[in-house]
Structure formats: structure tokens, C-alpha cells
């Protein structure tokens, strides 16, 4: 039963991934009625859809999990230190069952419109079957990487073989003995390639831009390590709140936390958002660097703070990486093609691999460098480049997502006075704290553009955002406010802060193209979308806003 006399529910939520599930639990706790709409037949969000071979998280399992329930922490045992997709999905299902969340979720329900009804001051959700439901508040828990993209290549719909996308991978795919092509060498492609290469007859990897792929962390989790984690969970959860990536840096092997640099809480902006205090690469000698890489691996390059802010340091790290590719791949021409040249390390999101480069030493794997032989068309038999026809039984798209804004824009959201979100965001996303948009009262996004989103541990960011929203709704109830939305001044200031922080970093350097910037989607406005200052600073900012009676928000 809704607290409003008019709405079907207090809170409507779109999406039953990590965010939607925690929303049910948190809003219920303060006596609000909640209804969640989910397109899939199961909970899990991106961890439901991305079932491709090799899919695994690159954030430690103990961090990439909910922090709201000490009991859940103690009862759940992670099989690996960095989890496979199936293990994360099992965890999410367990949470849904333990907290009895499924009863508030309507599965197989794609939302086709989200509309503010001006006369009733309610949000109305329409699903694909035409059903309409109203709520006082609406929370878009739709995820930042949930709208897969397929490039508009010539002949793209003519392919006659089996076509797959990593982000919509069906059960029971058998690639044994098949001629397989894969387009895309970002995080998803780099995970798939080494996993399927041993079983396929031949694998053709169609690469447009080579990645900086650094070896993934060792996933082994022993019972002793898990015991140490459980004994330290309260501190792990607390420490996450004080780090840029919302990762506690707890070493389960030794039982030690990595020390936090003193300036974490005072720097207020340009911090080491990789989550460890890596110092600067600039002053290090070749011998010192070689020793560090020998001890910590090539991925340690990403820990040096100055690679994100100083061009020369970035070039130094990028060069070392280029040498690493050369030494990993036997065929010099393939090694050259796999070497990133026109942009620096730290522009795109770090890609973690398991023997990715070594896979190109196999006889049944061919790299097709699309810079040397452009892709001309997809045809019924496969792919034709300027140099060759590649006949394929299976074609895999690992071509990524319309990130951060894609799901919000696709939901067909209309705010006050008929204002469309597509119109409001025609030049790029503008909002306050990644949470709210002017002209869309009582509508909230979770980890939207303008929040740290994918630059930090998403699960911690999600909990922080849902807690903020729930506290704000409690504040409104106490003050008898009916509507909340950000002021224009607050939005302008926040957008300007986000832009200034991103200026002059490796994320926005010339030559850098990434989904953070929207360059992967033709015609998408090119702005750096996440807040770059670090999760911990962002959280402090949100806490201050709440403490000051939600400064920057206008209430009616
Ligand atoms: O997508 P991407 P993703 N012709 O956008 C190529 C998270 N994630 O699914 O670089 C040819 O990174 C494109 O080439 P280019 C993580 O946040 C995490 O791999 O644009 N190629 C690129 O190589 C990640 O960042 C994990 O030139 C085309 C690839 O497709 C995010 O999801 C695992 C093309 C797309 O790479 C997205 O990763 C997986 C075209 N027309 C995902 N269009 C982990 O936790 C695109 N490409 C480890």
C-alpha cells in the first residue's frame, strides 16, 4: 500500500540488478511500497546477460559485494578472489532469496515509457504489454553498461551463420570445431579470446584499436584467505568508503590492508583513482621500473598517479607496455598490430587479460588488423576486408555498450511539461551528483553520469546512491515535501566541477577515444561522463549536501 492516496506504489524501480535489489530492501525498511520492473526473467542485471566464456570481474569479490548486511558477509563464501560471472550471479540470486526480494519484482517486463503526470504529480511506467503503473517516486536502476551496441557495418544484417553478442550470450553455445570471428578487443573481447581459442577450429580476431591489456589478478581463494576476509569484513566495508575506487585493498593472503596515503581525504580532486598509492613514474630509473614490474607485474604501471596527469609520464608508461606486447607475441607483424600507438595508457578503462597476447602464438588464431585491411562488409558467409574474405560459422560482437546514458535515454523518459530526456540531454548528460535531473522531479538515477560510476566499485557506489535517495525521501516525509529536483545553479556548478576535473587527464587526452567519452557511438555527444575525483571525495560531497538540508535540491 502506497503512502500516497493516489499512486499504486511509493517507489517504482526499473531494473533488478545490484541497484534494483538493494533499492527494494532499503526502501522497504523505511515502510515504502516498491515495485521493480525487469526485462529479464531473472535478477542480476549485467551479470545475468553477460554469460560469455571467460566473463569475470576485475574487482576483488570481497569488495564487489554488498556491504549492508554483516550476516550476509559472514554466511557467503567466495570461491575465488576475482569472481566468474556465474559466481556473481549465484550471489545475487542468494541475496534476492535471503531478503525475499523477488515478490516485488515483475520479470519479463520491458519498460517502454517513464512519464511524469503533471496533473497528478506521479510517475507512470508503461511496459511493453501496455500495462501502466504509477508511483510517487521513480528510481532508474538501469545500469551504466546495459545497452549493447552492434556497429552499423555494411551488410550487418545479412550474415547467415550464428551471430552472438557478448552482452546477450545465450545458454548452451558450442563453438567446438567452428570457424569463429570476433569483432572487438575491449574488456569483453580480451576475456573471450583466450577462453575459446583452444576449442574452435580457427579464431579470427578483428581489431580496430589495440588495447592496453594487463594480466588479470590471481583468482585463487583458499579457505584460510576467506576466514581472514570474514574476520576483517567490518574494516573492509569501512575502508572502502575512504578510497578513490571504493576498494579496500585488503590482502587476503597476508591479512594486511594497503596503507592509505595521508592526502586521500584532503586532496579533493586529482587523486590516484586507481585505488593504490603508486607514486610517480617520472623519477624512476629503468632499473627501478624493471624491478617493480618484475615484482608486481606490468599492470603496476596503472598505479602510477602521474600517468593520468602528465603527458611525459604517460608516454614513458605506454612505451614500457609496448615493449611488453612485443616480448609476448612471437610473430613481429602481429605484435606490431597488437601494440597501441596512437593513444596513451589510462585513456580507456583498464583491460585485464588471461594470456590474451600469448593466444596469438597459437596456429589457429589470426589477428585481422582493421587499420591495415579495413572491414568492407559483413556478408552471408562472414566478413570481407579490403584484403580478404573470412568465411565464418559464428560471428561474435564484443563491441560494447551505449554507456552511462544509453539505458536512461532508451527508457523514453518524459519529465515536467512534456520535457523529453532525449531533448534535455541532446548536447550531453547534465544533472546533479549523477542522481537527479532538473525538470524531472522525484526521478532518480543510480550511479548516473556525473557520479564516479564505472571509475569506482559499482556495488559500493550503488549502495551509497540508494542510501542517499532513501534518506532524502525520509527527509521529505519529515518536512512534508512532495517534490524534489535539483536547482539549475547546482546542476551548472556540478557539471563544471566534473568537466574541470577531467580536463588535462589521460581520459580526455587528444587521440583518446572511449565509451567514457561517448566516442564509441556515432553521433553521441562527446563529453567525459563520470566524476573523476574519486569515490571517497564524491561521498563526502554527497554527505555534506545531505547534512545541509540537501543543498542544491529544491523542494516543493
Ligand atoms: O566494450 P568496449 P567491452 N569495428 O567498448 C570495438 C566493462 N567490462 O564490452 O576501440 C571494429 O570496451 C572497439 O574498437 P575501438 C568494463 O567497464 C568489464 O569490451 O572503438 N571494432 C573495442 O575494441 C568495460 O570497459 C569487465 O576502436 C569495433 C570493442 O569493440 C566495459 O564493460 C569485462 C567497432 C568494444 O570495447 C565495456 O567493455 C567486460 C567497429 N565498427 C566488460 N565498434 C571486467 O570486469 C566497436 N568496436 C573484466
Image (cartoon, rainbow, N blue to C red):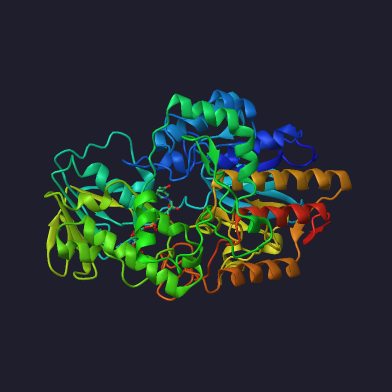
Q: Residue at x 33, y 60 (%)?
A: 211
- In the picture, measured across the screen, residue 428 lies left or right of residue 167, that is right
Q: Say which quadrant the N terminus sits in.
A: top right
- In the picture, measured across the screen, residue 92 lies left or right of residue 318, that is right
Residue 203 appears at what percent x and percent y? 18, 50
Q: Say which quadrant the C terminus sits in.
A: bottom right
Which of the two residues, 467 or 105, is positioned nearer the viewer here? 467
**Above or below 278: residue 132:** above
**Above or below 31: residue 459:** below
Which of the two residues, 84 or 326, is positioned nearer the viewer here? 326
Task: Work out whether residue 319 can be spotted.
Answer: yes
Ligand 1 visible in quadrant = bottom left
**Above or below 298: residue 528:** below
Q: Residue at x 55, y 43 (%)?
A: 15
Residue 6, picture quadrant: top right
Q: Residue at x 77, y 62 (%)?
A: 552
Residue 399, picture quadrant: bottom left
- In the picture, measured across the screen, residue 161 lies left or right of residue 167, that is left
Amino acid at each position: 500500500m502506497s503512502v500516497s492516496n493516489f499512486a499504486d506504489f511509493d517507489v517504482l524501480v526499473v531494473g533488478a540488478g545490484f541497484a534494483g535489489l538493494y533499492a527494494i530492501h532499503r526502501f522497504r525498511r523505511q515502510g515504502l511500497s516498491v515495485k521493480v520492473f525487469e526485462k529479464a526473467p531473472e535478477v542480476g542485471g549485467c551479470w545475468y546477460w553477460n554469460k560469455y566464456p571467460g566473463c569475470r570481474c576485475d574487482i576483488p569479490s570481497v569488495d564487489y559485494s554488498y556491504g549492508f548486511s554483516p550476516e550476509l558477509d559472514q554466511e557467503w563464501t567466495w570461491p575465488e578472489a576475482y569472481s566468474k560471472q556465474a559466481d556473481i550471479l549465484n550471489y545475487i540470486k542468494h541475496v534476492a532469496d535471503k531478503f525475499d526480494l523477488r515478490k516485488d519484482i515483475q520479470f519479463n517486463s520491458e519498460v517502454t515509457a517513464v512519464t511524469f503526470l503533471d496533473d497528478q504529480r506521479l510517475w507512470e511506467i508503461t511496459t511493453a504489454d501496455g500495462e501502466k503503473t504509477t508511483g510517487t517516486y521513480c528510481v532508474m536502476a538501469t545500469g551504466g553498461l546495459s545497452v549493447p551496441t552492434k556497429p552499423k557495418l555494411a551488410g550487418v544484417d545479412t550474415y547467415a551463420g550464428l551471430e552472438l553478442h557478448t552482452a546477450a550470450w545465450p545458454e548452451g553455445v558450442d563453438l567446438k570445431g567452428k570457424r569463429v570471428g570476433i569483432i572487438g578487443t575491449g574488456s569483453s573481447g580480451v576475456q573471450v579470446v583466450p577462453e575459446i581459442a583452444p576449442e574452435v577450429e580457427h579464431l579470427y580476431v578483428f581489431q580496430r584499436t589495440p588495447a592496453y591489456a594487463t594480466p588479470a589478478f590471481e583468482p585463487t581463494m583458499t579457505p584460510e584467505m576467506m576466514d581472514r576476509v570474514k574476520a576483517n569484513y567490518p574494516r573492509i566495508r569501512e575502508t572502502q568508503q575512504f578510497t578513490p575506487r571504493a576498494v579496500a585493498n585488503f590482502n587476503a593472503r597476508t591479512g594486511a590492508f594497503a596503507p592509505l596515503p595521508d592526502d586521500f581525504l584532503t586532496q579533493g580532486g586529482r587523486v590516484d583513482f586507481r585505488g593504490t598509492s603508486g607514486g610517480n613514474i617520472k623519477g624512476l630509473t629503468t632499473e627501478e621500473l624493471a624491478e617493480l614490474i618484475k615484482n608486481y607485474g606490468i599492470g603496476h604501471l596503472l598505479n602510477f598517479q602521474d600517468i593520468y596527469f602528465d603527458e611525459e609520464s604517460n608516454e614513458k608508461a605506454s612505451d614500457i607496455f609496448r615493449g611488453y606486447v612485443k616480448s609476448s607475441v612471437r610473430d613481429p607483424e602481429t605484435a606490431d598490430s597488437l601494440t597501441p600507438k596512437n593513444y596513451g595508457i589510462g585513456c580507456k578503462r583498464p583491460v585485464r587479460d588471461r594470456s590474451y597476447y600469448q593466444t596469438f602464438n597459437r596456429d589457429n588464431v589470426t589477428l585481422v588488423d582493421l587499420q591495415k585491411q579495413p572491414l568492407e562488409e559483413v556478408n552471408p558467409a562472414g566478413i570481407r576486408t579490403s584484403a580478404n574474405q573470412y568465411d565464418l560459422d559464428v560471428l561474435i560482437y564484443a563491441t560494447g555498450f551505449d554507456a552511462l546514458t544509453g539505458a536512461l535515454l532508451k527508457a523514453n523518459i518524459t519529465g515536467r511539461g512534456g520535457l523529453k530526456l532525449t531533448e534535455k540531454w541532446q548536447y550531453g548528460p547534465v544533472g546533479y551528483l549523477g542522481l537527479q535531473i532538473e525538470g524531472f522531479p522525484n526521478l532518480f538515477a543510480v550511479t548516473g553520469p556525473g557520479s564516479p560510476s564505472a571509475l569506482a566499485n559499482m556495488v559500493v557506489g550503488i549502495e551509497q546512491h540508494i542510501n542517499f535517495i532513501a534518506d532524502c525521501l525520509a527527509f521529505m516525509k519529515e518536512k512534508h515535501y512532495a517534490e524534489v529536483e535539483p536547482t539549475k545553479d547546482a546542476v551548472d556548478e556540478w557539471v563544471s566541477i566534473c568537466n574541470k576535473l577531467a580536463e588535462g587527464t589521460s581520459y580526455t587526452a587528444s587521440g583518446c577515444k572511449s565509451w567514457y567519452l561517448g566516442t564509441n557511438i556515432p553521433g553521441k555527444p562527446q563529453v567525459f561522463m563520470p566524476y573523476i575525483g574519486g569515490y571517497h571525495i564524491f561521498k563526502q560531497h554527497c554527505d555534506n549536501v545531505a547534512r545541509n538540508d540537501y543543498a542544491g535540491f529544491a523542494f516543493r
